[in-house]
Image: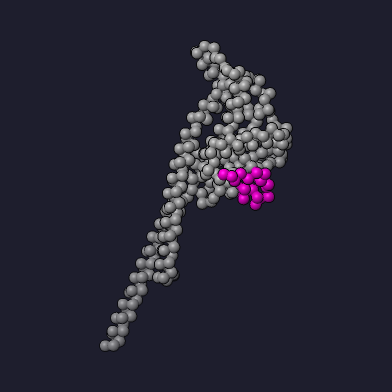
Amino acid sequence: MAGIKELRLRIKSVGSIKQITRAMEMVASTKLRRFQDRAVASRPYAQEITGLVGRLAGMLGSEIEELPLFQAGKGQKTLVLLVSSDRGLCGAYNTNVFRKLEQWLQARGDAGPVEYYVYGRKGASYLTKRGREVTRFLTDPPMEKVDYRNAALTSRMLQQSFLSGQYKDVVVFYTAFESVVKFVPTIVSFLPLTPAALGAGQKAAAGAADVSAAGDLILEPDGPTIFNQLVPRYLEVRIYNALLEALASEYASRRFAMKNATDAASGMQKALKSAYNRKRQETITKELLDIVGGAEAVK
């Protein structure tokens, strides 16, 4: 059994770790609240632009199938945007999204080569260790400082790569934020777009109902021009929301992991203190017995 001095050092070390994990939990809680508010605030705009694009797609009908972003790419490769974290200590956040990626790769079999654009050092490290080349590692700015402008640049980069003819489709892997205790690894098809994904049929019917109720709808400029201008904005919003939800999920996972670590440190500290007190009592009792024994021997 460990001595009193060693137990005292262990108690002190566990106490220091507990202070660190508690501080990290508080920081994660603060950042979670900030990114959660941003993610929730962006959803109404995302829903509105999605509904508008869907209604216009329904009104245009088969015309949209001739647009480049609605046609399968000419290449044979698939482009994957993988969103992970820059730092660890966030529980199973990265592990879950990596597992989702591996399941997808296994299911697609020999459907063609895959290239990767990556957000987060953990994702880049994971792919590199497994011999998968990272075509673009997006590090500037860091994930925490990403704003709509950066998300828009990423969306345009993905669109340009798709339209270049190198890829047949673009897929995004990220963690969708549902609540502070539920965040789900998600895969979404980014390009090519499909009328079904936009809900064009249902939204066209809703739009027709609105038109019949409000009279003839006049679009200025014309419908196709508005649609062509809205689609890039729609794709930018999708990337922006994915990044915000991934950040909120990361900090929710980190907060949960640090809370568990703090609770474990508290339990360990309590057990060590009990062992320390028992050892200290044993030592005191032994010393008292030695004193009593010595006194009896003198007599």
Instruction: Report which quarter residue 79 is drawn in.
Output: top right
- Front residue of 117/168: it is 117
Q: Please tell me whether residue 64 is drawn above or below residue 135 in the rendered image.
A: above
Q: Please tell me whether residue 298 is drawn above or below residue 270 in the rendered image.
A: below
Q: Residue 277's x, y, as percent?
A: 36, 67
Write the start and end of the magenta stretch as one range: 123-141
- Front residue of 65/30: it is 30
Which residue is at the far bottom?
299
Question: Would residue 222 be found to the left or right of residue 20 on screen?
Answer: right
Q: Residue 263's x, y, as percent?
A: 42, 53
Q: Residue 147's x, y, as percent?
A: 53, 39
- The residue depicted at 72 percent of the width and 36 percent of the height is 166
- The residue depicted at 53 percent of the width and 51 percent of the height is 88
* 276 drawn magenta: no
Q: Please tell me whether residue 106 is drawn above or below residue 4 in the rendered image.
A: above
Tell me if I can see residue 256 in this picture: no
- The residue depicted at 42 percent of the width and 49 percent of the height is 26
Instruction: Report which quarter residue 58 is drawn in.
Output: top right
Instruction: Report which quarter residue 276 is drawn in.
Output: bottom left
- The residue depicted at 58 percent of the width and 35 percent of the height is 152
Question: Would residue 298 be found to the left or right of residue 71 on screen?
Answer: left
Q: Quadrant of the C terminus?
A: bottom left
